[in-house]
Each structure stands twice: as C-alpha cells, then as structure tokens.
Amino acid sequence: MNKEKSSNIADAIKQWVRPEIRALKAYHVPSATDCIKLDAMENPYQWPESMVDEWLGLVKDVELNRYPDPSASLLKDSLRQSMSVPAGADILLGNGSDELIQMVLMAVAGQEQTVLSVDPSFVMYDMVATYTGMHYVSVPLNDDFSLDVAAFLAAIDKHKPAIIFIAYPNNPTGNLFERADLQKIIDAAPGVIVIDEAYHAFASDSFMDEAGQVENLLVMRTVSKMGLAGLRLGLLAGKTEWLNEFDKVRLPYNLNVLTQATAQFALQHQSVLDAQTETICKNRELLFTALSEIPGLQVYPSQANFILFRTRKGEASAIFDKLKEAGVLIKNLSPVGGTLSDCLRVTVGMPEENSAFLKALGQALE
Ligand SMILES: *Cc1c(COP(=O)(O)O)cnc(C)c1O
C-alpha cells in the first residue's frame, strides 16, 4: 500500500515538476549548533544591552494584526541616507537581496534569455536563473581570480545577456575587480547590469554614486553582511523606469512589520553597526597576516568579511573535516572544483573565534 503510494508520488513528481527543478539539489545550509560558526559571512557581534532594551520597547508597539506598509516608505528614507543613494536614483526593497535577484529575473525571464556572470561567483545567480527558466552563462575568472575582461566582452557579444550580475567585491573570492574593466562591461551591456555590493561595508570602492545616472546600471546592497542577516532586507538602486517594472513582480507585503521597524531602528543606531564593521576589517587584516604565515597555504587578499585560502593539493576536505571535529565550521569550496579546488573560506569572527580557528587549523595541518 505504502509502496504503491510512494511510487505514485514519484511518478507524479516526474510528470509535473519541471525537469530542471528536479535536477537541482536544495540549497544546503549545514546545521551549526554548539560550534564556532565561520561559514556564512555573518557579523558575530551583538548590540549593546541598552540598545536591545530600547528595541524591545519599540517592538512591543508593533501592530502584528495589521499588514505592513506595502511601500515601506519610512524605511526607504532611512536606507537612502544610510547607503548614500544618490538623489537621482530610486530604490526597490527586497526580502534579502536574494529576493531582488529573483524579482529582476522574473521580470525578464524567458528561455531564450541569458543571465551572465563570472565563475566562481555567488551561487544564487545561477540558481535563480534556473528557477526562472533562463539560460545561465558564466565566464571563468583568471587563476588569480581577476576578471578576464576580453573574455567577458566576447561573451556579451555572443550571448547578448538580458541581465549581468557582478558581485563587487566578489563572493567567494573576496576581491574587487578592476573598476575600469567593469566600466567597459557597463558600456557594452545590452540589457541591465546589476553590481551586487553585498560586502560594500568592508570594501574600498562602490558604484553607488553612478546609480540613477547610468541608464542600465543597478546597484544592489543588503543589510545582511553588516549585522542584520536575520532581518532579510536588501535594496536595489537605479533608474525609476527599470525599478517600476521589477516592482510589478514584487509580492505586496514582502517586508514584514518586524523587519521594517527593526531595520529602521538599527539604522538610527548606524554608528554601532559601523563600529562593528570597522572592528571586523581590523580583525580581517590580523587573520590575513596569521594565515599568510602558515606554510603551505595560499591566502587571497579580501575586501569583504571573509578570507579565501588554498591548501596543498588534495588536502582541503580533510582539513575542513578536522576543523569541524574541533568545533569550527567554515566553508569547504573544494568540492565545487575548477579554480576552487583545494579552497576553503573562513568568515572573519570575533578575535577569540579567529584564534580558535587558527589553533584548530594549525593542528589540522600537523
Ligand atoms: C550574501 C550575499 C547576498 C545575499 O544577501 P541577502 O540579502 O542575505 O539575501 C547577495 N549577494 C552576495 C554576493 C552575497 O554574498
């Protein structure tokens, strides 16, 4: 009886679920209870107790029985200021920047349309292209993870992409590409180019100044990496005409009342977040130096809140496992293969977490 049922389900799934979805593996997030969590680019710092108390007082009055403000207008004003969005640019908010990627691709989707990015880069560009039935093409980065601009321009010419995503700084490599190269890509892009600045808070450059001025340029930001990953809030800045189209596929109440109230509160205390970001950047430099001194590791400079490093050939997965056994969770990128073979990525944590990681790494390398 049971067996018959399950085979019916299997048949039904085969009949009704799109083949490209059946072929996917669900986005896997490893559980991380009771360990030092340095795998997900989170800000490790909490708010000061007085700030938490003030926030609790505010949350007490949030009306959970009411739908949220569909336009999140107060929050938009705070974000414009916090993210230095130019007056000539409009903004669109998403439930995390992941949702913005989804909205952009839903608005342009079509089997013959191409999404173009680089490889390796943020996995959601590829995933969401698949969800929306689009064709995904990525141009390999050079061995040092710099951008191969000639190859990228050739790919633009060949595929005429509807949408280009460039993470700046790039994830999982941590570097900024040459600004002049990106300028060439912006000029050559036939459709829209989204510069994904998820790590802007830790980086020395940004394209935000040009949002709203350059016709086909959109700049994407998130509050996730600056200490508010739990809220799920991202923004896209650019020309009103584009954003109006993308807004049509946004679900009406995509930002819940608690996110709106909390984000606005947090942005009123921006100096707390900024101080944490500054500390993380200092800790990144210390961690970079310490890693660079370990024989056998190749460590890549980072403008983000994580560091990518390469182990000796064939050793990454064993090192990752030993770290995990020692209670330190980082990200193993080696299974991805290609230029990421033998690569591990560690998020910059608190000094004591970074020390525990370095100690466990030293032991794993013995
Ligand atoms: C983390 C990350 C995001 C996702 O941000 P959310 O706002 O948390 O959805 C987007 N782009 C890049 C490059 C990232 O690393």
Image: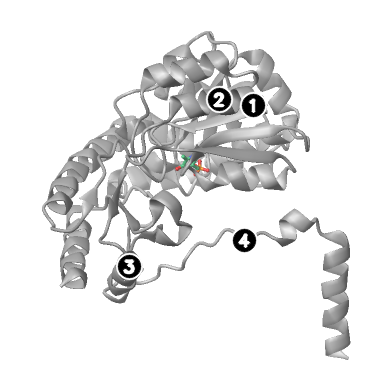
In primary-sequence order, the first of circles 1 and 3 is 1
Residue type at tag 3: Phe
* Residues at discs 1 and 2 in contact (Cβ within 8 Å): yes
Left or right placement of residue 140 versus residue 347 in this view? right
In primary-sequence order, the first of circles 3 and 4 is 4
Is the residue 281 above or below the residue 238 in the image? Answer: below
Q: Which residue is mark 1?
A: 158
Residue 72 at least partly seen: no
Decide: few, some or many residues near mark 4? Use Cα within 10 Å; few <14, some 14-19, many ≥20.
few
In primary-sequence order, the first of circles 1 and 4 is 4
Q: CA distance from mark 1 to mark 3?
A: 39 Å
Image quadrant where one finds the N terminus: bottom right
Left or right placement of residue 160 versus residue 217 in this view? right
Q: Which residue is mark 3?
A: 320
In primary-sequence order, the first of circles 2 and 3 is 2
Decide: few, some or many residues near mark 2? Use Cα within 10 Å; few <14, some 14-19, many ≥20.
few
Which of the labelled discs sits on residue 26, or is there none? 4
Q: CA distance from mark 3 to mark 4?
A: 22 Å
Residue at the spot x=28%, y=39% of the render?
302
**Where residue 140 appears, x then y in whole percent?**
47, 39
